[in-house]
Amino acid sequence: MLLLLLHLVTALATLLCVGEGYTIRSAVSWAVTSDVVEEELDTLSDEAPAVLVDNIGIWKQAYPSSVYRDASEKKPDQMSKGEDVSSASRVFSYRMEEVKVPSSIPTPPPHEEAARVARYMAHYSDWGHLATISTQEQIKGLPFGNIFSVSDGPADNSTGIPYFYVTPMDNTVTDLRSFPFASLTFSEAEGDFCRKQVYDPEDPRCARLTLTGKMVEVGPEELDFAKEAVFSRHPVMKKWPPGHDWFFMKLVLQQVWLQDWVGGVSVIPLEEYFKATPF
């Protein structure tokens, strides 16, 4: 009897010792060390996306904050080429205070003022969908759409003419060199208006604007304005790799097509379009 009791005590003591090295996760246990537990706790704080705006810039939410913390703490000679995350990410980062946009975007003009609505959308849209005739082998001669950042001028100076910063490496630019005509479409769904009104992007009350014309390279006489127009609204572009041979283009308009209410669309005469103001 004494021997049996000793065996039970020994078995219980063994279980208690082993139990100290286990952790419970959803009724499943596995052995861990105290170092692993501490490391996991540190990691958990970085599992959620980092804050959209931090002390370096934006577009950092895709990486855990520890990446930047650890990278900044290492000396240059301690970092390998594969660890240079901060320099790569900064190519597409910028401080928000550099973006010269209105402090608050005004509400859209009344839908009865079609020309003003068109100018409003052309000015306050930061990006649009550009459609070209493709030169890609598999879809040659078919429509091809691509997203581009655009600007019709600095925040306080609207021209109604969209300016672009592009590279010859882009398929769309290749298309334009073969056939320079294109259509640029904006949607009011880009901003908050349609969401606040609970309008679906295809609802005719959620305005959409299509500008059609010829894409041309910006000449030297207006290059300074093109730089101010684009870089004031998209300052990150100034940092993009120069080896991509970036250059400026603009859309010379031939038609302004707008749908901003039920009952049909408006084709706005160019004279009315350029006479109107988005402000």
Image: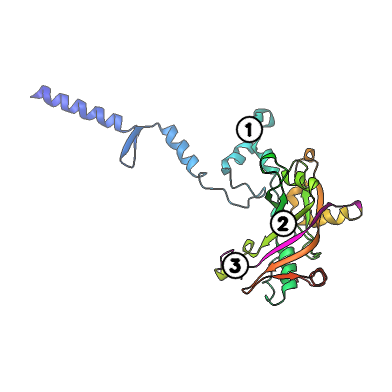
Residue 58: x and y in percent read: 65, 50
Q: Please, what is the three-letter code of the amino acid marked with disc 1?
A: Glu
Q: Is residue 72 magenta?
A: no
In the displayed structure image, the side of residue 248 where residue 190 appears, left or right = left
Residue 97 is marked as 2
Q: Point out the frontmost of discs 1 and 3.
A: 3
Q: What kind of element bears circle 1? A: helix
Question: Dividing the image into 4 quarters, which one contains the C terminus?
Answer: bottom right
Q: Please, what is the three-letter code of the amino acid marked with disc 3?
A: Cys
- Using the rendered view, name the quadrant where residue 257 is placed: bottom right
Q: Which residue is mark 3?
A: 194
Q: What kind of element bears circle 2? A: helix
- Front one among 198 and 107: 198
- Front one among 251 and 71: 251
Q: Which residues are magenta?
A: 199-220
Q: Which residue is mark 1?
A: 83
Residue 82: x and y in percent read: 63, 31
